[in-house]
Amino acid sequence: MSEPTDLRTDLQYSEVEQELRGNVRALLAARAPQAATLARTESEQPVDTALWRALADELGVTGLAVPEKWGGAGAGWRETAVVLEELGRAAAPVPYLGSAVLATAALLAAEDTELLPLVASGEVVAALAVPFAAAPRSPFPSAVQLRSDGLLHGTVHLVADARTATTLLVPALDQDGTPGLYAVRDFTAAPVVSLDMTRPLADLTLAGAAGRRIASGEAAVAALDTALAIGAALLASEQLGVAEWALETTTAYVKQRHQFGRPVGSFQAVKHRLADLWVSVAQLRAVARSAAGAAAAGSPDLPVAAALAQAFASQVTVVAAEEAVQLHGGTGFTWEHPAHLYLKRAKSASIALGTADRHRAALAQLVDLTL
Amino acid sequence: MSEPTDLRTDLQYSEVEQELRGNVRALLAARAPQAATLARTESEQPVDTALWRALADELGVTGLAVPEKWGGAGAGWRETAVVLEELGRAAAPVPYLGSAVLATAALLAAEDTELLPLVASGEVVAALAVPFAAAPRSPFPSAVQLRSDGLLHGTVHLVADARTATTLLVPALDQDGTPGLYAVRDFTAAPVVSLDMTRPLADLTLAGAAGRRIASGEAAVAALDTALAIGAALLASEQLGVAEWALETTTAYVKQRHQFGRPVGSFQAVKHRLADLWVSVAQLRAVARSAAGAAAAGSPDLPVAAALAQAFASQVTVVAAEEAVQLHGGTGFTWEHPAHLYLKRAKSASIALGTADRHRAALAQLVDLTL
Amino acid sequence: MSTPEVTESSLRAAVRELLAEHDPVRTPVAEFLGARYDAGLAWIHFPEGLGGRAAPRSLQQAVNDEFAAAGAPTLDPGRHGIGLGMAAPTLLAFGDAEIHRRFLRPLWTGEEVWCQLFSEPGAGSDLAALGTRAVHDGDSWVVDGQKVWTSLAHEAQWAILVTRSDPSVPKHRGMTYFVCDMTAPGVEVRPLRQATGEAEFNEVFLTGVRIPDSRRLGEVGDGWRVAQTTLMNERVAIGGSAVPREGGLIGTVARTWRERPELRTPGLQDSLLRLWVDAEAARLTGERLRQQLAAGQPGPEGSAAKLAFARLNQQISGLELELLGGEGLVYDDWTFRRPSHPSMEGGTPGYRYLRAKGNSIEGGTSEILRNIIAERVLGLPQEIRVDKDVAWKDLPR
Amino acid sequence: MSTPEVTESSLRAAVRELLAEHDPVRTPVAEFLGARYDAGLAWIHFPEGLGGRAAPRSLQQAVNDEFAAAGAPTLDPGRHGIGLGMAAPTLLAFGDAEIHRRFLRPLWTGEEVWCQLFSEPGAGSDLAALGTRAVHDGDSWVVDGQKVWTSLAHEAQWAILVTRSDPSVPKHRGMTYFVCDMTAPGVEVRPLRQATGEAEFNEVFLTGVRIPDSRRLGEVGDGWRVAQTTLMNERVAIGGSAVPREGGLIGTVARTWRERPELRTPGLQDSLLRLWVDAEAARLTGERLRQQLAAGQPGPEGSAAKLAFARLNQQISGLELELLGGEGLVYDDWTFRRPSHPSMEGGTPGYRYLRAKGNSIEGGTSEILRNIIAERVLGLPQEIRVDKDVAWKDLPR
């Protein structure tokens, strides 16, 4: 059975991280209130590019995980995870997970010094061209091929954060079947009606696109797998933010909403459900911190930490969002109330980067609990 | 996908059944109070043979499922199920499931007119010599063999209701590997310390025992499988009785027990848990009636009904007994309070005749939900 | 209660007689149903002349079966369920002869659609907290307020309406119940959009709506008791029809499982089997309830059936998205629309998942249903009430 | 709060000095611990002369680590946990100098065992309802009543005891707290047998037990506040030590899974993996709590940890029996016995299943813990209290 590398992984938030959180939260409160986010989902611009620019230029958080020598902030995945918590809490429609996590992790693994500074600065929004449901430890995708014309051909369905991306990182097979990872700027992204309205997906088509190979063979396989593992590990922090929003908003609502002459939150059944939810969210916080720590440390325990994080976060966050809808009563079921944005985010995130079922199956292999 | 034979299976209790229930309940209240049952578990006679005689002689319920022409009461499995409900509700230490259900079902399938009148009258307590955890649709057991000496040799572990049985029905293979079902009177039963103190198990040894073959080949296989399917179907009614006891006793307790100057049952979290439990028990009642009905009708849907009954009853009844312990607080955890008898009965019954997991796997085959 | 000569066979004979005179297939629906009403074969336990013949309710099934076997028309329950299930029994119980004469027949024939103006933004689970004011003015009432979650308000001619007629007494005592004309001046219906993107329901704004006192049901101040009659009939109506195995959402997911072997995993199989078991248990429980009702023993299982149904729909639709994996990330259409016939089975998996969330809220939240079971079935103590003896106007909100 | 010169390095130096003078392996345990007490290295945040040196509590871990590294002896928490964790802080906070002098040292050295006389048959979750009477008589008190669920009562010399000294005032105001001599006349200890067959706990009957007023802790009538100090320390004590992955019951079941391939099924695997995930999440949460406590930020997560621990133990031990199938039908021994060291991991699967049922009752039921989290952490309204202003003697029971 695998052992966590360091029993004493720091599961707290540092003062720097708390300060970072405060800055991101303040920006989101000012620039991305929920009513605006909801209205945006039915506009021509479901992704908030102005908010993205503010995160990049004003807070400089798009390159947290990138070393300073490659144009980043030289922080790491733990700090990136704190930003994700806040983005989840706000259901913010920005391509942070896709560009600053998935694509950045792939570029870091491939040590692509050409794109890293551009992506770290937020100038280029990049997307990893894999279906959003793809889990770590999956077979290398064959959806895109490098043909004899030296160009990439293929279609990749349901890619997250690709709608505003200007550069794709495309896993593709060449004519010998050798895996490669290519940077591509010539593609079309067809919008898909997505369950998560604040993270619209797109179908990508590469119809003879030129690509710059940034990794090949084993290195490409490793870069893709590391990116997906880090993505799965860090997505848990975004899910934590969603769950925290659900818990806090619902707690505030049941204190104020009266029925039968009493606050709804004075009924013990409601109290106990929220207490149970608080326990789950507190556990998710520890799990998410552990996963971010494993990513930050490049720990050999990352596959376990990531699978654990997704197996756990996907359950808790969906329950949190579902409880939020239920305990808001009819109000929580209306379009006007933001609860549905979080429900859709929670359910989609539970499928993203592998379902809980898929991650439990991975754990069975990793910790020797096979059939 | 298999369809229930008759969408309109009667799921009610008839007036005759309700009268039968009243008689059994009155007898058990008078002769098998829980304090006596608890004391008996640590005595030399954990099984209440006097109660058995009363059920047989005074109420005539040991042969309910046996036609009158074979010495029975000519009722059926539905009526037998009502008796089981009451025995479960009383945690009564009698070999009814073993003799009046499992062994009787095997004898009926084999049409063994020699033993049927003796078992129906309760004069002979018979046991089906299979491990109590054996599920329907298992491979025919090979624990006992008919050797060249023409005698039966072997050991069968953890057999229910065998401690007071004078006759065994033993599935055994002859030297050609042909299955047979044998009536055996020469055996030793070694008591086993059982989790369910009110249904002690025994290990059976046949050290060269003469057996009368009552079925052979396919008929033996079918008789054993039918007996196990009917046993699984009817055990759900006993489990229903256990769950009903747990729900009713706990409901009564929380009405009377005060903490914080209020009945514990006035706290909404407690109310909602008991409401949920009531819903589950009401569902179990329908499921158990359906299973008993399928057994009574000899329905081709019996395998589904039995697997459903065990998959469902095993979950609900354990939860009911666990909630009883919890909601009685410390009291429910003491030896003096009967709750633990029901907890042990519920957990053991959830394993008996196949675990819920095992029955779900059977359903996957039966209703075409395979992997 | 019933005249001795009404028997199942006499009823079946009466149906056959009606069928002989009115071709069930060729006669226009409203005309056929009108004839059925006039023959006392609509609600057979209603009085003669009002669609019934004062017969035992338990014989209704035989009448319905006989009509169904002949292919006779029935009304769409999605459009007429509130009228048939809730308004009609209340009109009968609390209306006078003029109310009966005016409303019951066109309700039964489907010529008039009904809706229910009960819930308000501040009165959901706690219906008795409602604040829509009704002020007596001459021989009519003037009504002002806002109702919410109103199905069919945009299609209905008539509504059953509960109002606050006296704010100075405790909340259960100051309500009055009316029949409200939905075409009257001051009635404004606005669609209420929900998480699925569509608007099944409405908000209804009542501004100076005048209702004649002759359209009052029950006494002034007795509206709570009238509303209880309405709601009791709602609960009885649920779970009333026989369902085949795999009849609900579980059948949809089971079919996906069978048709899409590439989606299968051992873990998802276990989840599916657990839900299959729960769904079959709920189905059998509904069938047992149906048999009990047919045998004239209505039990409290109606609340339990709705609780179980909501939980199952939510769990099954949640599993369906997980089973579909990437395909579960898409939706069909967020565009605002007004479906006339919302259907779980007809939608997409994403729609089902979202719509099922409403199942534990609409028509009594699961929390309220648990209270009902705990208090009325198990006899557990009522919640401590702080609102029993306080004038409605002084309640905290 | 602390003298500035106390630092981690000065403490470590003091420990090493003590170790140099007292061989941690060869010195008799009580003597070694006595020396540690006298050197102010027992509870470092206690005052000088009482086992401490008024140092910050956050430095205790370093002291403990230093002793542990040298193989120094510690007391068995099963036997001395109540004394060390609950009695000592209460004695310090509410005892006078004579109490401190008489009791703290032998408690620390393990020469005297303590138990806790709190719960009563009628006062479990509602501890403040307790009815054991204490009547002032001269310069002592006479105590009559019954306590229950008392660990170690049959081994203890001393008890912390809460009594009802004034039944005529509301329940929280009429309690008084004492140190009780368990060898005094009138103290009778009877084993309390539990569902597992054994008796870990006791009932304690107090009949005319005389306690000198000098053994009172806190003011007359102020026993509730004193008891809160005791219980707060109990909650802090839980979940304090680092646990490796698969450290609890989940490890036992995982080993069975690995060693017994014949037991495996896809459905059980899914259940096992779900519990593995939950157990690992709970472990990491405990570790986060431990880090918080070490950093001097005790949070309310202690209640959460106990809640999660109880649920996990129950679910895991339940799954274990299902996994074992037929073997899960047996038990080891129902014979009445008095284990001195009950251990979940050491028992049989059947024992674990039954014993785990107590985890959600003992030391605060899961229901009470949920109330605590809801009210103290989430700030939700308190339960409506009907017992706040009623004299204890007039409360319904």
Image (cartoon, coloured by chain):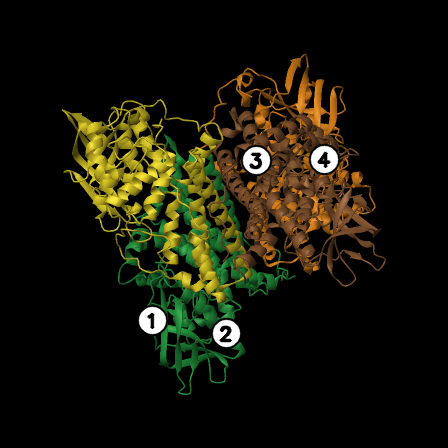
Chain colours: A green, B brown, C yellow, D orange
Residue at the (38%, 31%) spot, across then down: A262
Q: Could you say where residue B250 lies in the image, as x and y percent from the top left?
A: 57, 32
Secondary element at image label 4:
loop
**Mark 1 crowdedness (10 Å alpha carbons): few <14, some 14-19, many ≥20:** many
Q: Which residue is mark 2?
A: A140
Residue D306 in view here: no
Secondary element at image label 2:
loop
CA distance separating discs 1 and 4 = 68 Å
Which residue type does callout 2 highlight?
Phe
Which of the 4 quarters of the picture holds residue A248? Answer: top left
Q: Which residue is mark 4?
A: D200
Which of the 4 quarters of the picture holds residue C7? Answer: top left
Q: Which residue is mark 3?
A: B244
Q: Which mark is residue A268?
A: none
Which residue type does callout 4 highlight?
Glu
CA distance separating discs 2 and 4 = 58 Å
CA distance separating discs 2 and 3 = 55 Å
CA distance separating discs 3 and 1 = 60 Å
